[in-house]
Image: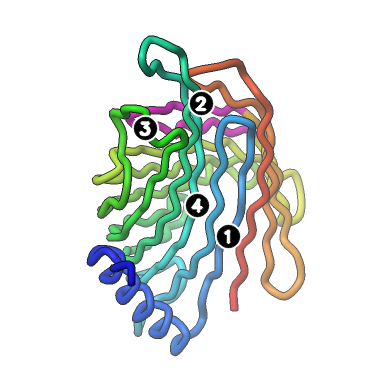
Amino acid sequence: MRRVPSSVAICAALSGLAFTAAAQQAPQLVIGGSQISSESSYTYLGVITPVQGARLGQGWFQKTVGSWLTYRYDTEHNGAPVGVRASAPGIETGMGYAWQGESLKGDVSLTVGVRHTRLRPADVPTDGPEGTQLTLTPQLAAGYQFSRTVDADLIASYSLGTRSRFARLRWGFQPGGDWRAGLEGVLSQGPDYRNLQRGVFVGLPLAQGWFIDVNAGQVQPRDGQRTPYVGLSFSRFR
């Protein structure tokens, strides 16, 4: 029988406890989505639950997120150019604190998890992560309402273990109703890859607590030409 790495077992146990605790509390925010290009992709599903005495967007919260990252990069092996593709599923769980003021809102969080990175071809040397890695990820999210119709928001994180970083800046407009549209810039980077995105997004509220976000644009990889990307994400209060 193949032995499960201890780090995987530990994080699976933590995530199981987190989902059990989340199921016993209300309300919850369920989040998920996927973004795809020819150079990379990222898919995630998670749940955010306030701890007892807090509420969504204000006070302490617990979150658990499972995700799947893929990317590609060019290198050399035995004197010949090689295109490497990587897939990296992972799961993380942790705690955070959210606040909300008249114009400024945000949250900070810290999660622990595991990510397993598999390279194809498998025999190519790499400077980045390979196999199972423990991760520790601090994250900051903040938004500022400049006026009734103009706002901006930022998400930034760094993952120890995989040595990867992510940052997204959006400039949004709300011309009427609850829908929102605007411009975005995204940087995702690790030891072996770097993707810079420029695009647009539209966010639409739906019935029964659903909110849908669609984004599209161009991604500039470290290796290769610009290519289109498209993404769809959702959130739901329950």
Q: Using residue 189 as the reference point, say whether residue 236 is left or right of it.
A: right
Chain part drawn in magenta: 183-198
Residue 123 tag number:
3
Q: Is residue 199 magenta?
A: no
The mark closer to the camera, 2 or 4, is 4
Camera-nearest residue between 137 and 107: 137
Tell which circle, 3 or 1, labels the residue nearer the N-terminal end. Answer: 1
- Is disc 4 in contact with disc 3, using a CB cutoff of under 8 Å? no
* Image coordinates for residue 190, horizontal then vertical, percent: 36, 33
| Circle 2 residues within 10 Å: few <14, some 14–19, many ≥20 | some
* Image coordinates for residue 162, horizontal then vertical, percent: 30, 43
Q: Residue at x 34, y 72 (%)?
A: 12
| Circle 4 residues within 10 Å: few <14, some 14–19, many ≥20 | some
- The C terminus: image quadrant: bottom right
Tell which circle, 2 or 4, labels the residue nearer the N-terminal end. Answer: 4
Whether residue 164 is situated above or below residue 93 in the rendered picture: above
Q: Quadrant of residue 99?
A: bottom left
The mark closer to the camera, 3 or 2, is 3
Q: Main secondary structure of the magenta part?
A: strand
The mark closer to the camera, 3 or 1, is 3
Q: Using residue 36 as the reference point, say whether residue 140 is left or right of it.
A: left
- The N terminus: image quadrant: bottom left
Q: CA distance from mark 2 to mark 1?
A: 22 Å
Residue 32 tag number:
1
Q: Is residue 189 magenta?
A: yes
Which three-letter amino acid code belongs to the residue tagged 1? Gly
Q: Secondary structure at mark 2?
A: strand
Q: CA distance from mark 3 to mark 2?
A: 28 Å
The mark closer to the camera, 4 or 1, is 4
Which three-letter amino acid code belongs to the residue tagged 2? Leu
Q: Secondary structure at mark 4?
A: strand
Residue 196 tag number:
2
